[in-house]
Image (cartoon, grey):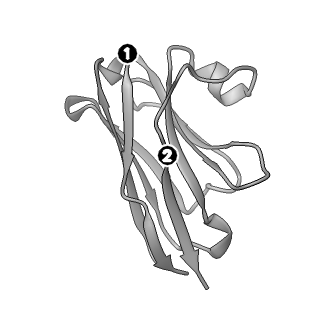
């Protein structure tokens, strides 16, 4: 069992940057592939980016490619999402997740077993 807590969300203007963090407790994140998702009201949760346990392989959704960067620091038990050139359509609740099987996360064939509570990101125009 690993507990995940996101931080770093907030209200910013279009074009700004934010860095989200996801800190784990109760377990070592080096055991897990991890990812960032987001959700807006009335829509399904969307995978933005995923990263293998070592950080050696990353996966980005089209909506995140080129503007968002996922990274991890296993020594600090923390996952990051650097978001640049933010747009109003990036407004959402952002969640981190952990899974033993990263392919399950990136394929969409199953939900990761561990989730954070989410952090709100609001981008004004």
The answer to the question of whether label 2 and label 1 lie on touching residues, with beta carbons closer than 8 A, is: no
- Residue at the farthest left position: 75
Binning the other alpha carbons within 10 Å of mark 2 as few (below 14), some (14 to 19) or many (20 upward) gives many
Q: Which residue shows up at 63% across the image and 26% down it?
A: 105
- Residue at the farthest right position: 42
Q: Quadrant of the N terminus?
A: top left
Q: Nearer the viewer, residue 69 or 110?
A: 110
Answer above or below: position of 3 versus 9. above
Q: Which residue shows up at 52% across the image and 43% down it?
A: 95
Q: Which residue shows up at 47% across the image and 40% down it?
A: 117
The kind of secondary structure element at disc 2 is loop
Q: Nearer the viewer, residue 50 or 118?
A: 118
Residue 54 in view: no
Return the residue at label 1.
31
Quadrant for residue 76, please give it. top left
Q: Mark 1 or mark 2, which is nearer the start of the sequence?
A: 1
Q: Is residue 53 left or right of residue 26?
A: right
């Amino acid at each position: 069992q690993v507990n995940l807590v996101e931080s770093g969300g907030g209200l910013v203007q279009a074009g700004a940057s934010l860095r989200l963090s996801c800190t784990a407790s109760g377990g070592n994140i080096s055991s897990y592939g991890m990812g960032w998702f987001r959700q807006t009201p009335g829509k399904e949760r969307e995978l933005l980016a995923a990263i293998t346990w070592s950080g050696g392989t990353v996966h980005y959704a089209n909506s995140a490619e080129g503007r968002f960067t996922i990274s991890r620091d296993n020594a600090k038990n923390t996952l990051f999402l650097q978001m640049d050139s933010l747009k109003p359509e990036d407004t959402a609740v952002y969640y981190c997740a952990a899974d033993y099987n990263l392919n399950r996360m990136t394929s969409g064939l199953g939900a990761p077993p561990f989730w954070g509570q989410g952090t709100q990101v609001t981008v004004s125009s």
